[in-house]
Image (spheres, rainbow, N blue to C red):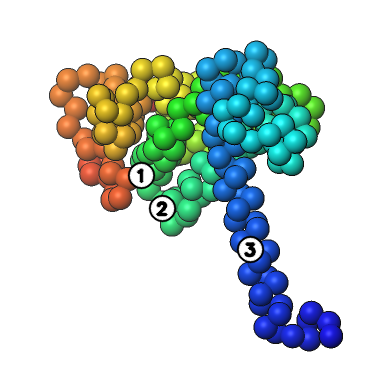
Amino acid sequence: MQLRDSPRLLAVFCAEIDVERSNYDEKLALILRTAAGVFAKKGYHRASIRDISRATGVSLSGLYYYFDSKEELLFLIQDQCFRTVLDNLDALIADVEDPRRRLRLLVDNHLRFFVGHMDEMKVLSHEADSLSGDYRRRVDDLKRRYSRLCAGMVEALKPADSTVDVRVATFALFGMMNWIYNWYQPDRDVPVQKLAEDMTRLFLEGHLGVGRTDAVPDADGPAAGDRSPSIWGR
């Protein structure tokens, strides 16, 4: 009897595959999270696969079931981070047209993910040049997609007579967000929602200084006020 001729056996077989895939994904996620911690602490080039093995409790042969080399491991960490952030952002802004709220959602999404993944943020920042060949190209493609998405939001907020460069503004925003791994302490500093609100306000309205009253759009609602964002000082 062929497997396809028995719906019950086919269902059991598919269920077993789903369980195996789930177990694989969970184990890989644990390895990537732990490896990011090792790379963040020791640096990619100083860390060894034996260090990863000790930290994860997985044998060397067991680790090589999930990746073929230390460089592939670094690639998987970076690839997973960027894909997760991008997928989450795509879902958040799918039906949002207001450019200020779209930017707020980008900031909120970025900070929420990396506040929970500080080691990964440090690895992405410090080991950007440690990948080569196809691994480097694939991660760079994701970075370009992310920066273009952000630049489009920044461009949509730019007054026609502004002389501020969109590229400069875009990477200034990323620089502000990505620096938090150096100082942000969740148990001591403001909650991540307030952090996102403050950074959005600094980016959009900072140069006006005291007296600005326009509300920064909440991640869950529309913007208040209709004045132009002021990073594009006229």
For badge 3, the amino acid type reads Asp
For badge 1, the amino acid type reads Arg
Q: Nearer the viewer, residue 212 or 12?
A: 12
| Rendered view: 24 above or below 176 | below
Disc assigned to residue 101: 1
At 51% from the left and 41% from the top, the residue drawn is 85
Q: Quadrant of residue 141?
A: top right
Q: Is residue 85 left or right of residue 21?
A: left
Q: Nearer the viewer, residue 70 or 151?
A: 70
Residue picked out by circle 3: 18
Residue 4, percent from left and from top: 78, 81
Disc assigned to residue 96: 2
For badge 2, the amino acid type reads Val
Alpha carbon distance from label 2 to label 1: 7 Å
Residue 26 appears anywhere in the view: yes
Q: Dot 1 surroundings within 10 Å: few (below 14), some, or many (20 or more)?
A: many
Quarter of the image with the N terminus in it: bottom right
Q: N-terminal of the two: label 2 or label 1?
A: 2
At 32% from the left and 24% from the top, the residue drawn is 185
Q: Dot 2 surroundings within 10 Å: few (below 14), some, or many (20 or more)?
A: some
Q: Is residue 212 left or right of residue 106?
A: left
Quarter of the image with the C terminus in it: top left
